[in-house]
Amino acid sequence: MPAGPHPSVEAYAQRRARVATQLQRESGALVLFGGALQTRANDTEFRFRPDSDFHYLTGLEEPGAVMVLRPGPDGGDLRFSLFVRARDRDAEIWSGRRIGPIGAVEQFGASEAFALAELDERLPALLDGCETVYLPIGRWSSLDASLAKAVSSLRRRNRDGRTPPLRYGEAADLIGEDRLVKDAAGLASLRQAIDITVAGHTATMRQAKPGMWEYEIEALLEYEFRRRGSTGPGYGSIVGSGDNATVLHYVDNRDRVRDGDVILIDAGAEWDYFSGDITRSWPVSGKFSGEQRAVYEVVLAANLAGIERAVVGSNIDAIHEACLDVLCEGIAELGLIESLTGPGAAAQIREEGLYKRFYMHRTSHWLGVDVHDAGRYTLGGKPRALAPNHVLTVEPALYIAGDQRDAPERFRGLGVRIEDDVLVRAEGPEILSAAAPKQIDDLEAIIGSG
Ligand SMILES: [Mn+2]
């Protein structure tokens, strides 16, 4: 295992205990599938990544595994059952070691563990008498089929005293609410993911040069991730220079970076299946042009204004609004809409939504195990109030596409997004990505410094 913080067996047990408290209330059980290998082509497969919820509660990263979690009656012992691939020496020679049922108990703290082949036979007894079965509804057809068999078996044997469940519940919602509030182990994993992400971004700032290819810069970034023990990017790295930076999900990364271009890099390293998510935009030559600097300063001011609102009791909409205030002022002052400058322009840009031609996405999302993390965004139809140990991004931007005809030509082909990862705390926001340079002086000092 790479050097760095990893959640202990106890940390995973605490997560299960919290979820079990929820299950207890409805006499429920939770069934999760760890995910299957995905075919890439023919007989080759993508590297396995476990299902996020499954890994969050077990720490196990083996394909095909199933967990069943069932609180005992009246708060009795929590039963944590795992089904894993049986040990098989021949298969392990070809496709890697397996934990096996004995290992699942000894290393992952399962109350009991069985070979996967026993799932259908044992599942009815594990669910007998519970009222709600939580599962990722419709996500895995094999799990749906196993559950349907178990439920119908219990129903058939109702006269023998078996009691089938009454309803299904959505596991993603149940676990998402727990994932939203980072626990100590999760926060340690996330800090590590973000620290590595910062190292990747600063390495590219030092080493990138005009004339390099975007994929070369992507490789520098991801080399730094892997070198530090990350499994790699938590999502497709965006490395876009010049006009490519105005394409929101540009992941082709195949153009040559020209002198004078601003490059936008949106990338995050993964650590124990938690992901960082940082965007920085900077001049590859090491020096902003006048126009680039002016646009950059507006986006930076918006980023700072947004982060200031990332406090307990605030919400993601308020952060977005704070960023929009700054961006609309900036669009008016810069004259990005040539026909619309002077007094009242900013208000008009805001009210009529004209900023959307330069800023068409939202400002924040939850961050954690998944880059766009779990957890509800609204409660009772209202934006959810931020609470301690929520982690979210703040990522305002301005994009002036090369073909944005109503914008002055000197601004076109420029995309600037500045994204930070922010921890909400009682004492105010902590910027987890603060070590990634974003002040203009800091950027100009580090770019090309080797
Ligand atoms: Mn993001």
Image: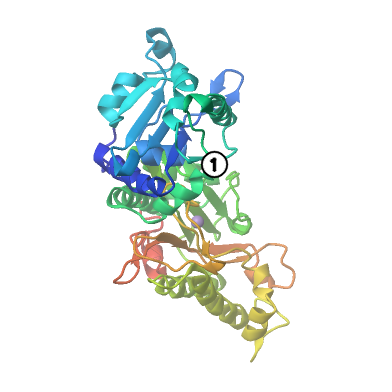
Residue appearing at x 54%, y 24% in the figure:
153
Q: Position of residue 363 (x, y in %)?
A: 53, 65
Q: Is residue 63 visible?
A: no
Q: Which colour assignment does the render follow?
A: rainbow
Q: Position of residue 432 (x, y in %)?
A: 34, 59
Q: Where is 339 relative to 390, above or below?
A: below
- Residue most toward the front? 159
The quadrant of the picture occupied by the N terminus is top left
What is the crowding at mark 1: few (fewer than 14 residues within 10 Å), some, or many (at least 20)? some
Q: Is residue 308 visible?
A: yes
Residue appearing at x 38%, y 66% in the figure:
387
Please tell me which residue lies in front, 128 or 345: 128
Q: Which residue is mark 1?
A: 168
- Residue most toward the bottom? 343
Please tell me which residue lies in front, 372 or 118: 118
Q: Secondary structure at mark 1?
A: strand
Q: Amino acid at mark 1?
A: Tyr
Q: Where is 26 relative to 436, above or below?
A: above
322 displayed left or right of 113: right
Q: Position of residue 161 (x, y in %)?
A: 47, 28
